[in-house]
Image (spheres, coloured by chain):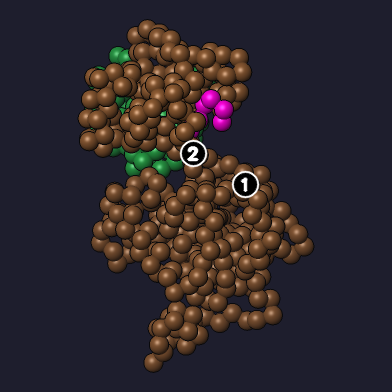
Amino acid sequence: MAKITYIEHNGTNHTVDVQNGLTVMEGAVQNDIPGIDADCGGSMACATCHVYVKEDWFDKINKKNEGEDDMLDQAYEPKKNSRLSCQIIVSDDLDGLVVDMPEKQT
Amino acid sequence: MIKTDALIIGAGPTGLFTAHQLKLIGLDCEIVDNLDKIGGQCIELYPDKPIYDIPAVPECTGEELTKNLINQLKPFNIKFHLSERVDEVKKDGNKWIVKTNKGTSFTTPNVIIAGGVGSFEPRKFSVEGQEKFENKSILYSIKDKNIFKDKTVSIFGGGDSALDWAVELSNNCNVNLIHRRDEFRGAQATVDKVHELAKSKKINLFTKFQLKKLNGSNEIESIDIEDDDKNIKNLKTDYVIGFFGLIMQLGPIANWGLNINKKTVEVDTEKFETNQKGIYAVGDICNYPGKLKLILSGFHEGALAARACFKLARPNEKYRFEFTTSSKAIKNRLGVKGD
């Protein structure tokens, strides 16, 4: 279990407990947190679960999957610390993770 | 005005199989899709990715699944209206009048929305002034390459479309190619070609840069691009073209008076009918308790919606359930010999 904080573009904070094994995307969707669309349902076929991972966390989480950067090319305003939240698997190590959400996904 | 028993919106797997079910029970139908090809997400998002959960098909790609579904429709003559987006659905007595963005209009008692997550639209730049220049000096596809002759064109993106056009246009225009990272996702041969052309100064390559600002009053005069470290470069340019792939937008469906919840349409599980009589939703776009976003669920939903269409299309006839293995009428429709 990990406490994950999702910050909407307008600054609204949502901190929720997410079970190990789920993805950061699923943590948001299951808790009705706005700002993550996840149109393709987590198959890395779209770029609508795009988040910015806080710098100090970026190197600590699992590396990008092959093809993830290809999808991020198609995201809304990608940055250096962009990730697809469906590709970040939650574990105890992620306790305290903070992700910022872009202004919009599409 | 085209008259049909049922109009299907969306030519993905669910739309295709729903068409099959309609034709099998003797109804005619036409299909509209905003993409320029048949197959929906299967062909646009994952043509090469294997799918493992189609019943009786251990493994197939999105493209193979689409091909098989098209094959299954071969006995029937179904009219597809591709590259058209349905913009308007309006009630007219006990019929629906449906209009597309290309001016095609239909009259039908049944509209089946098999629209996935909505229609595919190009992802656009998010900088200020984008709308003002769109379709003039900002483009997201190329219809006539001759307009760029001897002009400066700034292409953004790292996929095949961006690379192919950069190579092609470098023949007779001044090309800037801008991409947000060093790696490209296009075919290796094209990537090599781009690097070669960059070396010989036929293409001006800017990697790790993104569009920051558009400068100009009526037409774009120059653009500012910015890298990760906030360094800004100013490029003179006549055209700006973005190739960032397609995104899915619910689009006009939101305006048809349907119960919409989180980009999906609420339906019942008997007919897959929406809150509007004669409008159904099947596949990923529909929602009901227990809904699974699986292709096989779309097939089931389409089969039931097709039966519901019969009542409105043939109000004076009674629908009789028949098997394809034994029904003479169905075999006639399929053009196969009966026993």
Say if mark 1 contacts mark 2, CB within 8 Å: no
Q: Amino acid at mark 2?
A: Lys
Q: Chain of mark 2?
A: B
Q: Which mark is residue B101?
A: 1
**What residue lies at 69% left-to-right and 61% top-to-bottom?**
B1
Question: According to the colouring, which chain is brown?
Answer: B
Label 2 belongs to which residue?
Answer: B143
In the rendered picture, chain A carries what hue?
green
* Horizontal side of residue B210 vs B136, given as left or right: left
- Residue at the location (26% across, 34% down)? B190
Nearer-the-camera pick, B205 or B74: B205
Residue drawn at 54 percent across, 56 percent down: B81
Q: Nearer the viewer, residue B83 or A73?
A: B83
* Residue B19 coordinates in the image, percent (x, y): 50, 66
* Magenta part of the chain: B135-140
The answer to which of marks 1 and 2 sits earlier in the sequence is 1
* Residue B184 can be seen in this image: yes
Q: Is residue B36 above or below residue B161?
A: below
Q: Residue furthest right?
A: B93
